[in-house]
Amino acid sequence: MGIERPPFEDMYREYLGRVYAYVRAQVGSSADAEDVTAQVFMNAYQAYERFETRHATPAAWLFRIARNATLDHFRAQGRRDRLQRTIEREPQAEDDPAGRAEERIQYRALLARVAELPERQRDAISLRHSGLSFDEVGTLLGCSEDAAKMLYHRALKALRETVQKESV
Amino acid sequence: MSENGQELELEALERQLDDAFETTRPRAGFEDELWLRMQSSRPAPRRLRDAFAGLWNGVRAVPAVPAAATALVLIVAVGVGVFTLGGLGHPGGAGSGAAGRLSAPNAGQSFAESFGKVPTPVFNGGPKPTTPQQTTAPATGDFPGPVRLQWTGTFTLNTTTAPVYRYHEPSAADSDQFASALGAVLRGRPDGFLGMYSAADYTLKVRGTIASAQSSPAYFILSGPNLPASDTAGGPQAAADVFLAQHSLVPQWPYTVAVDTTSDPVKVVYERQFQVIGYGPAYLLNSNGDHYGIEVDLSANRVVLASGMLPVNFDIANYNLVSSADAINAALATSSTAASPAVPLVQLNHAEMVYVLVPAGDHSFYEPAYLFTGTLQSGGQSYTKRVLIPAIDPTQRS
């Protein structure tokens, strides 16, 4: 027996920021993150009447849509194109105070490192830190809760190595 | 490193990730924009049903932004005549019962007791011709020569004070902040501009007040080849509305909308108004005597230019007004003293309160003024005669 489906407005309000952060950690540019996040909620809005809470929590349902939208984004753009576009959009450090200010945001670099991880590791970290339980992460990634935990810890170690290399 | 040390490192990394994800949020305005997009993507009956459901559930603590957006959509859906009165956001006409709307300052505004004596507006000899849709039919422009003036209208003021708005001249940092909120990146600071910026599909330029031209601080968005064509099925105003919403530039002030389809590009102008308690909305006039605020130009279904007033924070103070009788006398005092019948007689028959920019260095002002208008025929042509009179009591002006 599932819980009552919350009003979409409430869910939108509660999850917009978290979904955006999840997407942002995947795509690496705020412009793309906005596009994908918009697509996530447009899709969710259209499908909300079919959402049944007995099959998934609202978070798991929404992040499934977010994950699919992100994958669609990668498929549509191609990683190389996306990277190129990201570079073109990124400000040149020497002539862009806004960009420099953005770089000063403490965790920007860390999310960029997350975006460079292999897809499943990136997903495991992003979903987990977007507030999903390991059970939900496992469901979304098509594995058991224990497997999701292992995947997450492998991802965490890989991220730590990347960060350590950067700081050397 | 010991296993324990590694675990501590991983825990620290997890805390950083928690913080990173919790502090990564979309820009301000994105939530509202997206909600409106979602609402507008649905069939009208469903929007109405949800809106009414929202009304019945009014006591439930619903999110402010979506609720406000729902209300807006409801107004759009059922507000027959709203568009014809002009404007999505804050339509209204003179005397529309606006008293009380300024009971608290809007965002970016603060009340002050007084700014001391404020500078007297200079009208450069009077406003120039208005655009065709703003003039009454046959008038073709302002009459250039001397005229004799006669007042035949009715002008009653139900207020003795009106607010004066003061803003601090925007800096390059203010400009950068505005551009950053739009997602545009600084490319340089060309002469005459606070900054030039680029985004994926447009170039943005921002400039401050131009005292000589009495022009407000403004932004200019020049579309690039990547800017997608607008959906003009709903007409040019709907396309302009969508463009402004997509760029978080929907006016946050009262306005009406004028659409000029007589030329290419089609111009959609969001004409700014200032609310005056006891009077109603008063249009802002530029140095040409035109209403202004934000203009979106569309050509071949594409937005080619969007320009508008750069958002600035206001300090507000109420000032005493010249009475309507004194204002009429002041207007008539600009009449030619020549008794020659060759000097045409103009019957001024309309008066309204307007606002004008008064540049004054670091701080500039939007001050109330009275605009008197009448028409005359000369040489087979129809002309408009307009007279602008400062509205603030002379003892409070420098």
Image: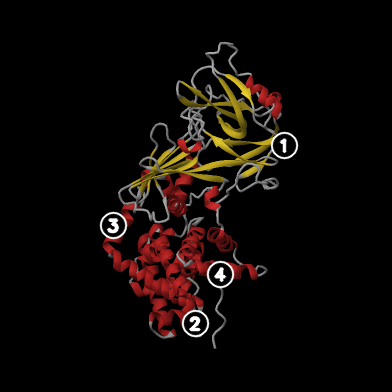
Q: Which quadrant: the N terminus of chain B? A: bottom left
Both labels 1 and 4 in a single chain: yes
| CA–CA distance in space, label 2 to label 3 | 40 Å
Side (left or right) of B125 relative to B110: left
| CA–CA distance in space, label 4 to label 3 | 42 Å
Marked residue chain, label 3: A
x then y, percent, for residue B258: 48, 43
Q: Which residue is disc 2 drawn over?
A: A52
Question: Label for residue B159?
Answer: 1
| CA–CA distance in space, label 2 to label 1 | 59 Å
Q: Which residue is disc 3 drawn over?
A: A84
> Amino acid under label 1?
Thr
Task: Using a 10 Å C-alpha cutoff, classify the residue at mark 2 as few (fewer than 14 neighbours), some (14 to 19) or many (20 or more).
Answer: some
x then y, percent, for residue B116: 69, 29
**Vertical comparison of B125 with B79: above or below:** above
Instruction: Report the residue at 42% width, 32% height from top.
Output: B192
Side (left or right) of B351 relative to B180: right
> Amino acid under label 2?
Glu
